[in-house]
Image (cartoon, grey):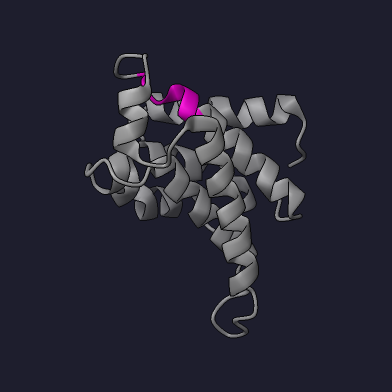
Amino acid sequence: MGTTASRADEIAEAVIDRHNNQHNCAQSTACAFAHVTPLDEDTLFRVMEGFGAGMGGNAETCGIVSAGVAVIGLLSSDGKESRTTKQRTYEIADEFVERFRAECGSTCCRELKEASPVPTPHRCDNYMRTGARLLAETLTAHDLA
């Protein structure tokens, strides 16, 4: 995938495009990375459906963060047969989550929405762009994509 700014921008715009086409934030983020995961876009869409709007509309963990961690798990885990990658996966997920928190101020949907000066329906666009960029950078840094 590469960490070039243009590729990260491309992925970020793919996230926004999906969100504008009725994907929730988690679906938008995960589906934009379908090309590097072992799952097809329809399966990712279904899996991530309940994570939108802070986990089923509860405004808890941001769907962008949930999707990023899911993509990291899909790419980092060696599966149930070997089970040797859990610690590495946790470390990579933690890195992504902490970078998102540092740049956006929180990983809580409610807090992010309250802090955004942008009105709905584009209130989370900047968070989605940031999350997509951070996820692309994290995957590349750990040779996952």
Q: Tell me: residue 41, above or below residue 88.
A: above
Query: Residue 112 lies in what quarter of the image?
Result: top left
Q: Tell me: residue 33, above or below residue 18.
A: below
Q: Tell me: residue 60, above or below residue 92.
A: above
Measured as percent of width and height from the top left, residue 38 is found at: 58, 60
Viewer-nearest residue: 73 or 111 = 111
Left or right of 80 on screen, residue 5: right
Measured as percent of width and height from the top left, residue 63 is found at: 38, 43
Viewer-nearest residue: 104 or 25 = 104
The quarter of the image holding the N terminus is: top right
Measured as percent of width and height from the top left, residue 54 is found at: 31, 43
Query: Residue 47 lies in what quarter of the image?
Result: bottom left
Measured as percent of width and height from the top left, residue 81 is found at: 58, 85
Residue drawn 48% across and 23% down? 126
Magenta-drawn stretch contains 125: yes
Left or right of 124 on screen, residue 5: right
**For the magenta stretch, what is the residue range?**
122-128
